[in-house]
Image (cartoon, coloured by chain):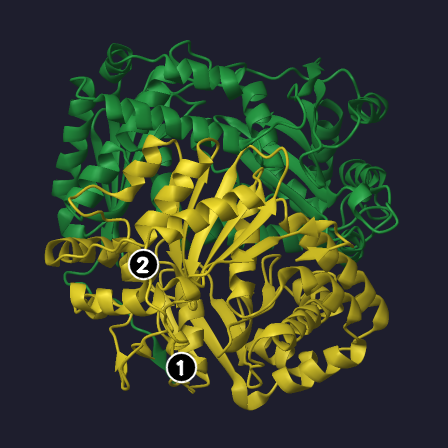
C-alpha cells in the first residue's frame, strides 16, 4: 500500500497460515512499536465454533478477560517479565471489535517480536489462574464505574441499541465475569485467535523483509488447522437515559445510530470520511454553531462530535459538559438539520484532515490503532487521502439526511447527585 | 536492524536574563513543534490570573479577532494542533502556548508552515484582541471565568486525580505547591478585564520566557525571532522550594458515593532531580512501583488480586514520592500492610538481580522512547531548565545502570511516610446508582 501524495507506504504480506504482516518504516525513530491483533472484541459474544453448527453465547466481557489471561505462562510467571528482561514494555487492550497485544522497545526487536508471536499463540488457562484474575478485573470494572465519561458513553450505547452487544460494557460486569471458566476461554481462543483472523503491524526503523521472514519462520514452527471464516450471527431503544453520579456539572451525550451500516472496504471508508467531515462542518471548532453554543455558555472547548463504527454498527456521538442539557439538546436538534454546508468549509476541512493523516504516521500508537481498525474492516488506510479528496458537498448533504433521523436518536445524561461535596 | 540516519546533538540554545530559546533540529519528524513558556511562582494572588490568561489568549487576536477565525486559521494550516494552557512544576506555574504543524516539505505545493506558525504564535502571545478601552473584552473574560470555574469544580469527576490532589493539598498545609495549577474559585471571581490585562502586561514584559522548537528547522530562525520580538531584561528563574515535611504518618479518610476506594500515600524523599544520587532514588521508585514487574504491581495485584493498578512515582521538583492504588473498600488495611511490607523490603535491600536488570532496561526504554515524541522532548528540556540541572538522555541511562543495591538502601533509609489519604464509600453496603431509562 502506498500513497504518493503524502509519501508514505505500508508493506503488507500475507503468510500461508493466513496471517497478515504489515510494516510502516520510520527512519531515525528510536522506538519500535508492534501490535498483534485479532478481529475479536466485546461484541463477539455469540458465534459458531468452526466445525460445529449451532451458535454459542458466552459471558459478557470474555474477550477482555481472555486478553488479560494471555499474559500467563505455563509453569507460572508472566509475559510482562519476558519483555522486561529485554527492556521492552508490553500491554494489551480490548475494544468492541478487536483485541490488541503490543510491545514497544528501543533494542532487541527480533527477540521481542518472537515473544509477542509466541505468547499470543500459546494459551494457558487453569481454574486457579482464571479465578485469580476475577479479583483484578472486578477492580478494573469498578474503576470504570466511577468514571462519569465512561458511564455517559456506555449508557448512550445501551439507549441506542436494544439487542446489539455493542450496548454492553467491553469489560462485562462484575457478575458476568464470575461465570468465566478455562473451558470457555479455550473455546473463544480456538475460534478467534486463528492466524487468518489476525494481523501483525510494526512501526519503526526496521526492514520490512526482515520482519516478514522472521514471522514466517516463527509461524512455520507451529501447526494451524485450516479454518473457514468465522460465522458471526447478525445482531440487530429507549430515547433517554440518566444516571446520577458525584460530578460537578451535568454531562451530556447525544447519539445517532447509523442505520445504513455499509459493510466493509471502500464504501465503508467513504461513508466514514463523509460522516467525519459532516460533523466538523456542523460542529467543529471552526463552525458557526460551535461558536454560538460556546458564546451562549452551553458548551466548553472540550465539546466534541464524531462518528465511529464497525462492520455491524455505526454511531455518531456528540457531547460534553453543560449546565443546561435540555437547552443544549433543543439547540442541537433544531440547528443540525438546517446549518448551511458550504464549499469553502469543506475545502478547508479537507486540508485539516490531510495534515492529520500525515501527522498520524509520526505517532506509532495512533497509526497502529488506525491501521488495525481499518484492516479488520477491509479498508486500505492509504487510500484515505484519495477518497478524502473526492468527497463532494452533495455527499455530505446525503450523509446528513440519512444520519440525522429522529427515530435513531438517543440522549445520555450524567447528573450531579444532590449532596455531592466539592 | 536499526541504523541511525543522522547524528543528533540534542537541543541547542541558551537561557539568560530570563530569556531563552532551545531548538532540537532533526529530520525524524514530519511536524514542527513550537512551544512558548512563561514561568511564574505559584502565588495565591496571581495563580488564578495565570490560569485564566491562556483561555483569553485563545479567544482572539488582532488578525484573527474571534475564536472561530482562530480555529479556521488552524484548519487552513493543515489541522495544526494549538494549545494554550497552564502546567505546574513544584511551586512554579507554567503558562504555555504551543503549535504543532506539518512541515511544508511534506505538503502539496510545499507551503512555508514554519513562518506561518511563528506568526500565529506571536499574534497569540503579543497581539491579543482588546476592546476600545485597551483591555480584554469584558464578555470574553466573563465567559472564560465561568468555564474555568466549572473546570475547577470538575476535578471531582476524576476520582484518581481528586484523591491525588487532596493528598498534595493535605501535605502542603497552605504552602504554594499545594495550589492547583487551575487556581481557586474564590480568587477567580475577583478577576476583572483590567486586572487580567495588567497581569498580562507584566508577564509579557518581565516573566521568564523561553521558546522551544523541535523539527527540521534552522535554529537561527528561532534565535532571531526571540531576540527581535522579546524584551531581553526579564526576571530570572527562582529556584523551586523542595518539600519540608510538616506531617508524620498523618491519615485522612474521606467519604463519597464511589464504587472503588482510592488509596494515595505521600512520602518525603529528601532528594530532587538535581541531587547527585537522584538516579538511585529513581531506581528505588522503579523497583518499588514503576512498572509491571515492580514489587507493588506483583504483590498488590498479581499475588493478592487486590487492585487493577498500583504505582509509585516521584515528584522530582518537590522531593516527594506518591503511591496510589484503586481498591475494594474493605481491603484498605490489607493494602496498607502490603505497601508497608514492600517499603521495608526495599530498606532491607531485598532486591534481586532480575529486579535491578528489568528496571534499568525499562528506564532505558522509557528515556529513549521519549525522543520519538516532540512534546516529550520539550517537556524534558523544560523540566531540566526549571529544576536547574540533573541528568537526561544517555547520561541518565548510564547513571541508572551504575546504581548499586547499597545505594538504593541508602536512599530508602531517608524515605519517610508523611500522609495517607483514602477515598472510600459513604454507603454501608455497596451498590450505587444504576442507569435508569425513562
| A168 left or right, relative to B109 | left
Where in the figure is residue B418, as x and y percent of width and height?
26, 26
* Secondary structure of the residue carrying numbered label 1: loop
Q: Residue B147 appears in which quarter of the rendering?
A: bottom right
Select label 1 or label 2 by which is in front. Answer: 2
User: Could you say which is closer to the camera, residue A212 or residue B143?
Assistant: A212
**Disc sitting over residue B408 in the figure:** none
Q: Do the residues marked 1 and 2 share a common chain?
A: yes
Given the image, what chain letter belongs to the residue carrying mark 1?
Answer: A
Where in the figure is residue A116, as x and y percent of width and height?
37, 46
Where in the figure is residue A61, as x and y percent of width and height?
29, 67
Residue B58 seen by the camera: yes
* Secondary structure of the residue carrying numbered label 2: loop
Residue at the image position 31 percent from the left and 58 percent from the top: A223
Chain B: what color? green
Given the image, what chain letter belongs to the residue carrying mark 2?
Answer: A
Residue at the image position 37 percent from the left and 32 percent from the top: A86
**Where is the N terminus of chain A found, in terms of image quarters?**
bottom right
User: Could you say which is closer to the camera, residue B9 or residue A30?
Assistant: A30
Residue at the image position 37 percent from the left and 22 percent from the top: B282
Q: Which residue is mark 1?
A: A164
Q: Which residue is mark 2?
A: A223
Task: Determine the residue located farthest toward the bottom in the rendered image.
Answer: A407
User: Marks 2 and 1: in contact by CB < 8 Å?
Assistant: no
Task: Count all numbered tags in the image, as a single digit.
Answer: 2
Where in the figure is residue B190, as x and y percent of width and height?
59, 43
Chain A: what color? yellow
User: Could you say which is closer to the camera, residue B405 or residue B315?
Assistant: B405
Residue at the image position 62 percent from the left and 57 percent from the top: A301
Amino acid at each position: 500500500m502506498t500513497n504518493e501524495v503524502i509519501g508514505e507506504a505500508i508493506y503488507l504480506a500475507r503468510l500461508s497460515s493466513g496471517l497478515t504482516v504489515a510494516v510502516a518504516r520510520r527512519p531515525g525513530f528510536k522506538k519500535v512499536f508492534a501490535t498483534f491483533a485479532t478481529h475479536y472484541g466485546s461484541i463477539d459474544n455469540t458465534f459458531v465454533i468452526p466445525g460445529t453448527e449451532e451458535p454459542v453465547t458466552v459471558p459478557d466481557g470474555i474477550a477482555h478477560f481472555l486478553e488479560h489471561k494471555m499474559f500467563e505462562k505455563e509453569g507460572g510467571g508472566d509475559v510482562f517479565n519476558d519483555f522486561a528482561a529485554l527492556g521492552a514494555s508490553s500491554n494489551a487492550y480490548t475494544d468492541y471489535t478487536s483485541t490488541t497485544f503490543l510491545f514497544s522497545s528501543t533494542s532487541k526487536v527480533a527477540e521481542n517480536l518472537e515473544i509477542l508471536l509466541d505468547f499470543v499463540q500459546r494459551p494457558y488457562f487453569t481454574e486457579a489462574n482464571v479465578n485469580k484474575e476475577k479479583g483484578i478485573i472486578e477492580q478494573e470494572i469498578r474503576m470504570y464505574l466511577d468514571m462519569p465519561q465512561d458511564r455517559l458513553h456506555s449508557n448512550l450505547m445501551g439507549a441506542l441499541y436494544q439487542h446489539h452487544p455493542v450496548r454492553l460494557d467491553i469489560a462485562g460486569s462484575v457478575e458476568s465475569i464470575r461465570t468465566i471458566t478455562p473451558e470457555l476461554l479455550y473455546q473463544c481462543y480456538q475460534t478467534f485467535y486463528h492466524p487468518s483472523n489476525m494481523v501483525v503491524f510494526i512501526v519503526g526503523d526496521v526492514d520490512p523483509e526482515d520482519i516478514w521472514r522472521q514471522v514466517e519462520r516463527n509461524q512455520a514452527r507451529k501447526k494451524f488447522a485450516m479454518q473457514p471464516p468465522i460465522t458471526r450471527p447478525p445482531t440487530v431503544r429507549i430515547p433517554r437515559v440518566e444516571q446520577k453520579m458525584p460530578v460537578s456539572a451535568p454531562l451530556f451525550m447525544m447519539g445517532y445510530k447509523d442505520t445504513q451500516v455499509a459493510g466493509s472496504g471502500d464504501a465503508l471508508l467513504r461513508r466514514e470520511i463523509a460522516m467525519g467531515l459532516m460533523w466538523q462542518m456542523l460542529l467543529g471548532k471552526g463552525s458557526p454553531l460551535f461558536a454560538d453554543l460556546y458564546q451562549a455558555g452551553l458548551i466548553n472547548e472540550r465539546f466534541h462530535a464524531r462518528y465511529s463504527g464497525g462492520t455491524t454498527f455505526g454511531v455518531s456521538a456528540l457531547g460534553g459538559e453543560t449546565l443546561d442539557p435540555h437547552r443544549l439538546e433543543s439547540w442541537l436538534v433544531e440547528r443540525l438539520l438546517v446549518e448551511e454546508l458550504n464549499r469553502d468549509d469543506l475545502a478547508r476541512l479537507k486540508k485539516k484532515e490531510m495534515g492529520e493523516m500525515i501527522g498520524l504516521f509520526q505517532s506509532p500508537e495512533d497509526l497502529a490503532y488506525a491501521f488495525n481498525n481499518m484492516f479488520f474492516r477491509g479498508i486500505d488506510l492509504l487510500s484515505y487521502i484519495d477518497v478524502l479528496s473526492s468527497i463532494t458537498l452533495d455527499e455530505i448533504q446525503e450523509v446528513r439526511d440519512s444520519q440525522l433521523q429522529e427515530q435513531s436518536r438517543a440522549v445520555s445524561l450524567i447528573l450531579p447527585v444532590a449532596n455531592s461535596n466539592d | 536492524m536499526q541504523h541511525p540516519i543522522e547524528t543528533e546533538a540534542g537541543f541547542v540554545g541558551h537561557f539568560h536574563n530570563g530569556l531563552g530559546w532551545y531548538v532540537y533540529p532533526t529530520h525524524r519528524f514530519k511536524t514542527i513543534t513550537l512551544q512558548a513558556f512563561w514561568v511564574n511562582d505559584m502565588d495565591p494572588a496571581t495563580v488564578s490570573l495565570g490560569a485564566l490568561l491562556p483561555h483569553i489568549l485563545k479567544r482572539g487576536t488582532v488578525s484573527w479577532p474571534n475564536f472561530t477565525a482562530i480555529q479556521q486559521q488552524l484548519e487552513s494550516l493543515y489541522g495544526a494542533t494549538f494549545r494554550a494552557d497552564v502546567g505546574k512544576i513544584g511551586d512554579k506555574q507554567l503558562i504555555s502556548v504551543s503549535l504543532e504543524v506539518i512541515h511544508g516539505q511534506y505538503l502539496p505545493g510545499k507551503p512555508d508552515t514554519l513562518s506561518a506558525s511563528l506568526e500565529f504564535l506571536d499574534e497569540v502571545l503579543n497581539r491579543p484582541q482588546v476592546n476600545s478601552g485597551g483591555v480584554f473584552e469584558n464578555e470574553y473574560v466573563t465567559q472564560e471565568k465561568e468555564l474555568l470555574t466549572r473546570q475547577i469544580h470538575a476535578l471531582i469527576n476524576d476520582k484518581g486525580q481528586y484523591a491525588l490532589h487532596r493528598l498534595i493539598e493535605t501535605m502542603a498545609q497552605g504552602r504554594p505547591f499545594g495550589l492547583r495549577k487551575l487556581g481557586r474559585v474564590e480568587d477567580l471571581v475577583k478577576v476583572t478585564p483590567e486586572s487580567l490585562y495588567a497581569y498580562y502586561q507584566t508577564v509579557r514584559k518581565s516573566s521568564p520566557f523561553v521558546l522551544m522548537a523541535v523539527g527540521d528547522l534552522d535554529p537561527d530562525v528561532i534565535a532571531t525571532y526571540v531576540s527581535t520580538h522579546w524584551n531581553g531584561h526579564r526576571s530570572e528563574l527562582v529556584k523551586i522550594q523542595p518539600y519540608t515535611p510538616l506531617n508524620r504518618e498523618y491519615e485522612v479518610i474521606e467519604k463519597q458515593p464511589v464504587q472503588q476506594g482510592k488509596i494515595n500515600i505521600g512520602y518525603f524523599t529528601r532528594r530532587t532531580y538535581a541531587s547527585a544520587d537522584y538516579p538511585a532514588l529513581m531506581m528505588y521508585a522503579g523497583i518499588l512501583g514503576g512498572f509491571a514487574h515492580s514489587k507493588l504491581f506483583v504483590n498488590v495485584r498479581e499475588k493478592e488480586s487486590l487492585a487493577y493498578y498500583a504505582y509509585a512515582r516521584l515528584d522530582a521538583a518537590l522531593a516527594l514520592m506518591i503511591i496510589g492504588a484503586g481498591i475494594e473498600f474493605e481491603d484498605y488495611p490489607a493494602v496498607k500492610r502490603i505497601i508497608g511490607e514492600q517499603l521495608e523490603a526495599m530498606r532491607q535491600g531485598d532486591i534481586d538481580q532480575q529486579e535491578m536488570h528489568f528496571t534499568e532496561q525499562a528506564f532505558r526504554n522509557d528515556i529513549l522512547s521519549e525522543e520519538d515524541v516532540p512534546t516529550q522532548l520539550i517537556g524534558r528540556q523544560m523540566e531540566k531548565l526549571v529544576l536547574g540541572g540533573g541528568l537526561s538522555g544517555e547520561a541518565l541511562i548510564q547513571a541508572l545502570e551504575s546504581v548499586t543495591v547499597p545505594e538504593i538502601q541508602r536512599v530508602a533509609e531517608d524515605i519517610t511516610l508523611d500522609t495517607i489519604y483514602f477515598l472510600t464509600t459513604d454507603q454501608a453496603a455497596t451498590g450505587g446508582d444504576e442507569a435508569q431509562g425513562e
